Amino acid sequence: MGASLRPVRRALLSVSDKTGIVEFASALAGRGVELLSTGGTAARLRDAGLTVRDVSELTEFPEMMAGRVKTLHPRVHGGLLGRRGVDEDVMDAHGILPIDLLVVNLYPFAETVARPDCSFEDAVENIDIGGPAMVRAAAKNHDGVAVVTDPVDYDRVLAGLAEQDGTDWRLRLDLAIKAFEHTASYDGAIASYLGSLDAELKPTPHPRTLNLQFHKLQDMRYGENPHQSAAFYRDAKSDEPSVATARQLQGKALSYNNVADTDAALECVKCFEAPACVIVKHANPCGVAVAEDLLTAYDRAFACDPTSAFGGIIAFNRTLDGATAAAIVERQFVEVIIAPDATDDAVSAIAARKNVRLLVCGRWPAERAASVDYKRVTGGLLVQDADLARVPDGDLKVVTRRAPTAQELQDLRFVWEVARYVKSNAIVYGRDSRTVGIGAGQMSRVWSARIAREKAEDAGLPVAGAVMASDAFFPFRDGIDQAAEAGIVAVIQPGGSIRDDEVIAAANEHGMAMVFTGMRHFRH
Ligand SMILES: NC(=O)c1ncn([C@@H]2O[C@H](COP(=O)(O)O)[C@@H](O)[C@H]2O)c1NC=O
């Protein structure tokens, strides 16, 4: 561990994002700090009336090659890398002045390549070289130098200077870690962009090396099981309302399984526009309902499978109200409740159960942004687009003699959305915008159908008149025969089996309506 406190006599400022730089530099100057700076930054500071020394005066070299070479010089890098208490003689011999504070943010590479009209030449010109070189130098020499790469840290540094007239070792180390995280992410973005270009230099979705950055949100007591160590990280690039961005208003710390199940519940409830409730147990919905209000939606989702709902995770797509919150805590043991927001009454109602985790995540946009799913396998990673695609109404194909009624079609749409979030093989029975039986995760489709039926019977919910969704095609007619026997009147499924004719004939025999989506929703 190095010296704890270092005075700041000289600072080098070279920033692309000039937010707050004038105020920060003024405060430094007010403390007698000498300011060194590069072209555009120096001009901005001088415009604000500050006295600034140009880096080109220090290096005795002009900035050249359209800014490609400005700070790449021993007088700069020696001033950043020189070991305090060790290298003073060398520094003196070569006219190198110590630089105690480096303030740099880099050319906006990620923002540049995100522009649809970005040319290859624009992208390359926005690869910052001198900035990362200085940032890495200062971060390595954090024993003597503080490095600031993010304007949000200006106040932290100023507070340290005001309190201690210097920078503290802990602060310098923290800033150095942040600096290396920043350069890692920066180089990752460059490698990802260049590594994704096709022969015509057009970006493709999957780069040859995957560079991701996730920030730790919390260490967990354990993972899926108590003997597994675990932590929860947030995708540095995603700000979509999610379990990772949600704010916890009360309750115990989230466990590994809580996070996974909360994600499953929230992602499912995001599919619905009307007030909706999804109850998840072990990654599968065990009750889903859409209604005029949240309380009714919750009542109906709970009624689908009260046994499984015990200890479940509940997600809503509207602000949680007091009546709904009170009904939940009076009726059942619940691990997590998540909603876009919660009223004060709801918060008070949940407060009666101290351990219940209450999360608010904000409202999400009606149009889901495209995102990517990752699945770890031993020695590798599978990457795919998230399954967010929706079949337009016009693409639904009625394949039976009988077309679904308007009510049946509405219910088919509902169970189809739910099936997307049920592990394969998925069979969902539903009626009047609520699930009545869910068969999940079976190795054969016919068994999922059997379970959906048994679940409905167990919950005392009539199957007669209900509809059925299957996440993939029926390979044989047995699933249809069984559903008909239970009282199912309409079916939605992708179609595409070599025995579709046999399956359609079975539906016709039973007087069922059947709709093909042409889209499958496997979920493993
Ligand atoms: N080439 C260099 O020696 C160099 N030194 C610093 N920069 C970058 O130049 C930018 C600031 O430039 P200006 O002060 O001219 O606006 C910063 O983003 C900084 O990271 C450089 N630019 C690119 O590599």
Image (cartoon, helix red, strand yellow):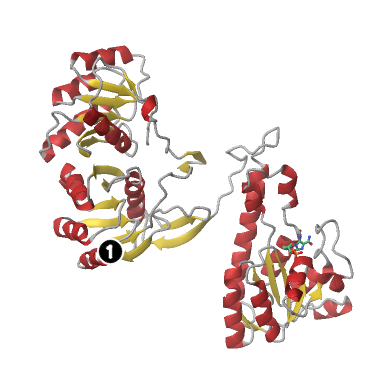
| Amino acid at dot 1 | Thr
Q: Does residue 174 appear anywhere in the picture? A: no
Q: Quadrant of residue 26?
A: bottom right
Residue at position x 25%, y 20% from top?
Answer: 403
Q: Considering only vertical position in the picture, is 492 above or below 237? A: above
Image coords of residue 40 (percent x, y): 76, 66
- Position of 13 relative to 517 (above/below): below
Q: Residue at x 16, y 37 (%)?
A: 455
Q: Is residue 104 placed above or below 307 in the rendered structure?
A: below
Residue drawn at x 18%, y 59% as measured from the top left = 323
How packed mark 1 is, by other alpha carbons closer than 10 Å (few <14, some 14-19, many 20 or more), is few
Pick the residue in front: 389 or 58. 389
For mark 1, what is the residue?
Answer: 343
> Viewed as shown, does residue 146 lie left or right of 368?
right
Left or right? Give the position of 504 relative to 366: left
Residue 95 picture location, percent across and down: 87, 77
